[in-house]
Image (cartoon, helix red, strand yellow):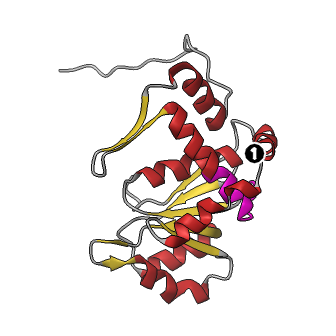
Amino acid sequence: MSQLSYAHGTGGTALLGDTIGRNLDRTAAAHGDREALVDVASGRRWTYTEFVADVDELARALMASGVAKGDRVGIWAVNCPEWVLVQYATARIGAVMVTVNPAYRAHEVEFVLKQAGISLLIASLAHRTSDYRALVEQVRGNCPGLRAVHYIGDPSWAELTAAAPAVTREQLAAREAELSCDDPINIQYTSGTT
């Protein structure tokens, strides 16, 4: 008969009081030339220094697009580098990233867009047999809070990132200074069995 393990009490390591952005900066300062992200499918690789630069560019672009602290930014994509960049960029500016299940159909996407209050959606163009652009257009009229949609690998993605120079690094730093490690950064919809 095996015995269950149970531990309690104070741990030896204190919780970090850093935001995700500050933690990323500290990691990049210590390991800037090491790989932070590898996308085997495309052969793309980022060092921590390169990753932080791309996160900051996307964070500034989101700010230029009107994304404020607490706003909900949806990500409707399978695992890809942009998914990771969106997570860190939204955390860096105090926005809340809302994950949308890649298998969702139109009515499910509509529910999440409305219920979570997503104001900006970043999506893949398609997954398997689902044309995400067509599905979004099918429900967009029912989602008055959805201000913008940008598709990864599409000119709309390039338009989003091209907006970054409208926000200075100082403005990004000022936004980050307003954040707390207790601010929410993610809403994860699940099937109910998670």
Residues in magenta, as a range:
58-69
Q: Which residue is drawn at 47% across and 25% down?
A: 33
- Residue 5 appears in view: yes
| Quarter-of-image position of residue 144 | bottom right
Q: Which residue is drawn at 53% across and 76% down?
A: 111
Find out whether residue 60 is within the magenta segment.
yes
- Residue 178 appears in view: no
Q: Mark 1 points at which residue?
A: 172
Q: What residue type is labelled 1?
A: Leu
Q: In this view, does 163 lie above or below 87?
A: below
Position of residue 32 measured from the top left corner of the image (x, y, whole percent): 52, 25
Position of residue 188 measured from the top left corner of the image (x, y, whole percent): 50, 55
Q: Which residue is drawn at 35% across and 69% down?
A: 103
Neighbor class of circle 1 (other Cα within 10 Å; few <14, some 14-19, many 20+) is some
Q: What element carries label 1?
A: helix
Position of residue 187 measured from the top left corner of the image (x, y, whole percent): 56, 55
Q: In this view, does 180 lie above or below 33?
A: below
| Quarter-of-image position of residue 35 | top left
Given the current orientation, which residue lies at the most extreme left position? Answer: 1
Q: In this view, does 11 lie to the left or right of 61?
A: left
Find out whether residue 154 is within the magenta segment.
no
Q: Is residue 81 left or right of residue 114?
A: left
Q: Is residue 150 left or right of residue 190?
A: right
